Amino acid sequence: MFSIGQLSKKTGVKIPTIRYYEQMGIIDAPMRSTSNQRRYSNDEVERLSFIAHGRELGLSIRDIGELIELNSHPDKPCSEVHNIANRHLLLVQSRIKKLKSLEKELKRMVGQDDGGNIGQCYVIASLANHGLCKNKH
Amino acid sequence: MFSIGQLSKKTGVKIPTIRYYEQMGIIDAPMRSTSNQRRYSNDEVERLSFIAHGRELGLSIRDIGELIELNSHPDKPCSEVHNIANRHLLLVQSRIKKLKSLEKELKRMVGQDDGGNIGQCYVIASLANHGLCKNKH
DNA sequence: CCTTGACCCTCTAGTTACTAGAGAGATTAT
DNA sequence: ATAATCTCTCTAGTAACTAGAGGGTCAAGG
């Protein structure tokens, strides 16, 4: 049995974040000491680490909640879990794609090292210029 | 002179978003018709497109505001603009890096196509497993 | 025993960039 | 004239926290 501060140290999750997770219902409200302080056991370390890892991977807390929910029914088929992970993979891949084209454009901007003044600045010009914009609008 | 709805159509920026930008001071409050409706000219189309393009590139509205501010002093040196673009480039590159390692891990999870039940699910296991986690905690 | 410092509590509000909705007035088309 | 479609302001909700106010609790040293 340990305090929220100790749980925080064990998991690397900040104290207000732990309380926030509790409030969001993603972790259960723990027991309290006689003086109303939260008291945790190793089970919560496990769960919180699971959540932290998922967040690190960019999963939403809602997704993680779903995974936890699924996890408590070990007889269910694995496919639902895979769906979540797969959906997230697709999202990540499209994000990477967007960022890469953005990187290219920014590189072109910065690479253009015109030492001039803003009147001829390539960055400004390229932001204003619709011609450079491959997408709609 | 046209209405907010028409500006929205011309730029692809949604009406509430335009009002939000006005409220945030990133675009100027426009003239109003006698009945208090916003009336825009082509100047605002330009500016709004500039903003939309910047947002698409992932610049914060604060950054865009800075760029606009700088842009209204065309005699200033270009380097400040470059700084913003460059700062953002670095940010984007680190974001890409993170996402790629994330993609790798997710692929490993999803690739593991065990058709079993959750008891043996690789995704869950790998989220729970600290050993897989290269980072601190 | 008492105090000091570090911890914990709840509650509220701020962050970013919007989006949605309520309730009311204006414009346009038929 | 009336209906459909704007537009107005204002408030609140979104995600995932973070920060701060104002107060209670605990362990160690003097």
Image (spheres, coloured by chain):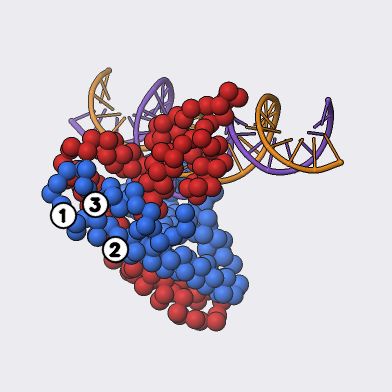
Chain colours: A red, B blue, C purple, D orange
Q: Are marks 1 and 3 on the same chain?
A: yes
Relative to the observer, which residue lies in front, B92 or B19?
B92
Q: Label 2's element?
A: helix
Which residue is pictured at 41% across the width and 31% down the height? Answer: A28
Across and down, in percent, residue C24 comes to: 43, 21
Across and down, in percent, residue B98 comes to: 39, 63
Q: Earlier in the sequence, mark 3 or mark 2?
A: 2
Q: Label 1's element?
A: loop
Across and down, in percent, residue B119 comes to: 22, 43
> Which class describes the residues within 10 Å of circle 3: few (<14), some (14-19), or many (20+)?
many
Specify whether residue A94 is in view.
Answer: no
In 3D space, how far apart are the residues under numbered discs 3 and 2 (Cα atoms)? 14 Å
Q: Residue B122 carries which label?
A: 3
Which residue is pictured at 39% across the width and 41% down the height? Answer: A47
Relative to the observer, which residue lies in front, A73 or A109?
A73
Q: Label 3's element?
A: helix
Q: Is residue A5 above or below residue C25?
A: below
Across and down, in percent, residue A37 comes to: 57, 29
Q: Which of marks 1 and 3 is nearer the N terminus?
A: 1
In 3D space, how far apart are the residues under numbered discs 1 and 3 (Cα atoms)? 8 Å
Relative to the observer, which residue lies in front, B93 or B36?
B93
Q: Name the chain letter of the residue that bears numbered label 1.
A: B
Q: Which amino acid does label 1 sit on?
A: Asp
In this view, the mark in front (1 or 2): 1
In the rendered image, which residue does mark 2 sit on?
Answer: B104
In the rendered image, which residue does mark 1 sit on?
Answer: B113
> Which class describes the residues within 10 Å of circle 1: few (<14), some (14-19), or many (20+)?
some
Q: Name the chain letter of the residue that bears numbered label 3.
A: B
